[in-house]
Amino acid sequence: MLKIGTVTTPEVESATRTPPHREFIRYSNLCKADDMTATVVMVHGAWHGAWCFDRVLPILEQAGVRAMALDLPGHGDDSGPFEDLHGDAERVLTALDAVGEPVILLGHSYGGAVITEAGVHPVVQHLVYLAALLPGEGQSCMAAAGAAMAEATLARAARGEDATQSDQSKPIELADVLIVDGDTSTVGEAGARALFMNDCDETTSQWMLSRLGGQPMANMSQVPSAIAWRGKPATYVVCTRDRAVPLEMQRVFAQRCSSAIDWPTGHSPFASRPDLVAALLIDQARSR
């Protein structure tokens, strides 16, 4: 059964951070199943919270895989202030300190930038980028996205391919759907449905719409202080019906990872196809 709670911090020399408050962690099956199974830690993207993995956690629990999903500061059940990219990564690092054992670390969308910085933690064995932004050295999310699209455009031109896309496959321009209030943005209902829920049923869409929140804009322009995927194995999940992170952009990011897999989903497979997300994480957790 899905629970919200805390974990006990083991004696780890590098653990100098204060563990995140119990209300900011959703977890399943905290009692470790066996020494051969890694723990799964999931990090949400912009405008989301740990709630977005609520359909994945019970499947992992049923499979005996220890797992947790974190609220980044100011998101989901965390009513505190937003933090910048580095503060978000710090929230993940404190949770990894508390786990103290091999981890499969997943980041969705903007969460990819967060795990790129936090994933250098020594307990992280494998990174999973789920339709995620994947910045390199000196790149912010915005810079990485722009560079990836430029690379994809040049490659398409070199192949002599037409850039025309159907209305159903072309990405949505964020600038067209964001509602900006000072330093924070939200996504209106029509934009959220188009960006995040194009393959979700109405019940799922209503569930997500009732939980989406704000996102600090500055985080997208900040550069991770470390690049975890350079030194650790990483799997990139390409969501081929995604209208938030363009398919061509995902293809470029996937080339940076040690492995990649395609799913015929939109941007939110944790909601529309939690079975796919769980199956991948179960396989990774049991392979460590």
Image: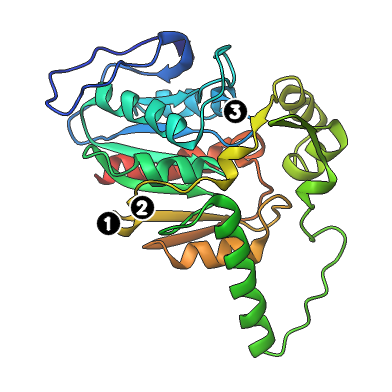
Q: Nearer the viewer, mark 3 or mark 2?
A: 2
Q: Do the residues labelled 1 and 2 touch (CB within 8 Å)?
A: yes
Q: Which of 68 and 245 is in front in this view?
A: 245
Q: Nearer the viewer, mark 1 or mark 3?
A: 1
Amino acid type of the residue that numbered disc 1 sits on in the rendered structure:
Gly
Figure check: 270 above or below 79? below
- Disc on res. 118: none
Which residue appears at 69% of the width and 48% of the height?
266
Q: Are marks 3 and 2 in contact (CB under 8 Å)?
A: no
**Residue 218 in view in this figure:** yes
Q: Where is residue 158 in the image (x, y as percent from the top left)?
A: 64, 89
Colour theme? rainbow
Q: Is mark 2 on a helix, strand or loop?
A: loop
Disc 3 versus disc 2: distance between alpha carbons? 25 Å
The circle drawn on residue 231 is 1
Mark 1 lies on a secondary structure that is: loop
Quarter residue 108 falls in: top right
Q: Position of residue 202 (x, y in %)?
A: 82, 30
Say whether marks 1 and 3 touch (CB < 8 Å).
no
* Amino acid type, residue under disc 3 in the picture: Cys
Q: Earlier in the sequence, mark 1 or mark 3?
A: 3
Foreground of the two, 38 or 231: 231
Question: Which badge, 3 or 2, comes first in the chain's sequence?
Answer: 3
Q: Distance between the residues labelled 1 and 2?
A: 8 Å
Q: How crowded is mark 3: few (under 14 residues within 10 Å), some or many (20 or more)?
A: many
Per the image, label 3 sits on a secondary structure element best described as helix
Circle 2 residue: 227
14 horizontally vs 237: left or right:
left
